[in-house]
């Protein structure tokens, strides 16, 4: 049953808002009347987006430049919000990045940063803001990936970080099921953003990608259901793949995943 969230007059915090899915979440939420807090490292991009959103939607958009891999980033962000008198009722934990290559060759510092951003910061920020979110009628959206549904050889740590996000979000969602907060883990497949530039020059985006509009539009419409599912995979092909990964023998699911990732590897 449809029961749209009323975002007007509320505040949404979006991490990773300087590009890709995060910028689209911010645009869509602002278009529905939410004031938005835009968090990422690239301050100029955040400022430009904030000006765009304030001009087109008559909302307040607050850019906060912050490196979420810093150990106390979540507490720092909560203090910053409190200092500005901002009480969010929606949080989109979207900031994240991927690494590609055999784990045995991986860089230890880069691996630690990935876990810090994709896992530790997401958990810490959820913990910092959840008490406030529970006082409202908004949403907690954690961005996982279709790689959450099976192991990802060639992107082992990234895939595992997203499996964590999926499991964590579904569990927290269940814990707060009697509140008015709608909790959703969204697991996009390949989506046209800067993600594949960050993953590395030896890895190409797949030919079939969804657009940020498709992914974010579908996510927000799931949240507009009176009882949203605990998690959601946008795009029917991606949803089918995730479903199949849970049905076929695990060895097969891992092999298919490895082949898909290998296909993205540049041979030149
Ligand atoms: N695109 C895909 O195919 C795909 C598929 C499945 C899941 N996802 C997930 O979707 C989410 C968004 O990624 P995207 O595809 O939109 O990629 P993107 O365009 O590269 O955006 C990533 C965002 O994360 C921010 N970020 C990175 N490191 C950060 C840090 N240390 N502190 C704060 N912010 C940081 C970036 O901003 P700054 O660089 O300015 O800090 C940027 O705004 C990620 O969690 C990703 O894992 C993407």
Image (spheres, rainbow, N blue to C red):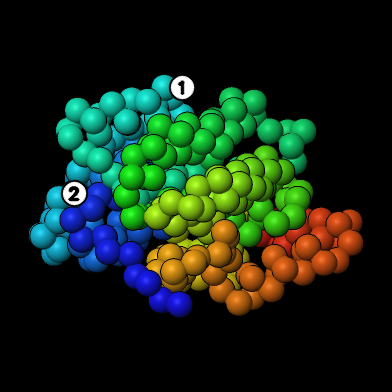
For mark 2, give the secondary structure.
Answer: strand
Task: Give whichever of 204, 3 is nearer the camera.
Answer: 3
Residue found at the very far front of the displayed protein? 178
N-terminal-most mark, 2 or 1:
2
Task: Give whichever of 114, 202 is nearer the camera.
Answer: 114
Residue plotted at (77% across, 33% down): 104
Quarter of the image where the C terminus is located: bottom right
Image disc number at residue 145: none
Tell me where residue 262 appears, x and y as whole percent: 74, 57
Local crowd size for mark 2, using a 10 Å CA cut-off: few (<14), some (14–19), many (≥20): many
Tell me where residue 78 appears, x and y as whole percent: 32, 31
Image disc number at residue 71: 1
Residue 50, placed above or below residue 209: above
Task: Give whichever of 71, 32 is nearer the camera.
Answer: 32
Q: Is residue 143 left or right of residue 51?
A: right
Q: Is residue 123 left or right of residue 19?
A: right
For mark 1, give the secondary structure.
Answer: loop
Task: Give whichever of 67, 165 is nearer the camera.
Answer: 165
Residue linked to disc 2: 61
Q: Is residue 98 left or right of residue 43?
A: right
Residue plotted at (73% across, 47% down): 154
Q: Quadrant of residue 234?
A: bottom right
Residue plotted at (77% across, 69% down): 244
């Amino acid at each position: 049953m449809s029961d749209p969230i009323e975002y007007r007059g509320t505040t949404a915090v979006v991490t990773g808002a300087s590009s890709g899915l995060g910028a689209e979440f911010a645009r869509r939420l602002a278009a529905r009347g939410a004031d938005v807090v835009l968090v990422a490292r690239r301050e100029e991009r955040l400022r430009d987006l904030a000006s765009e959103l304030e001009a087109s939607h008559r909302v307040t958009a607050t850019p906060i430049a912050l490196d979420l891999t810093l150990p106390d980033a979540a507490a720092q962000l909560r203090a910053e919000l409190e200092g500005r008198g901002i009480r969010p009722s929606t949080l989109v934990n979207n900031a994240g990045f991927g690494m590609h290559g055999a784990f045995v060759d991986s860089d230890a510092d880069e691996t630690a940063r990935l876990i810090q951003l994709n896992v530790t910061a997401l958990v810490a920020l959820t913990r910092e803001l959840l008490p406030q979110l529970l006082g409202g009628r908004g949403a907690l959206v954690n961005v996982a990936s279709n790689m959450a549904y099976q192991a990802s050889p060639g992107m082992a740590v990234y895939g595992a970080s997203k499996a964590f996000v999926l499991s964590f979000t579904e569990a927290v969602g269940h814990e707060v099921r009697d509140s008015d907060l709608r909790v959703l883990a969204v697991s996009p497949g390949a989506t046209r953003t800067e993600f594949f530039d960050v993953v590395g020059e030896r890895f190409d985006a797949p030919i079939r990608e969804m657009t940020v509009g498709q992914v974010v539009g579908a996510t927000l419409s799931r949240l507009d259901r009176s009882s949203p599912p605990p998690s959601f995979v946008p795009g029917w092909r991606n949803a089918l793949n995730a479903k199949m990964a849970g049905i076929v023998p695990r060895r097969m699911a891992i092999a298919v995943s490895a082949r898909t990732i290998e296909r993205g590897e540049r041979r030149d």
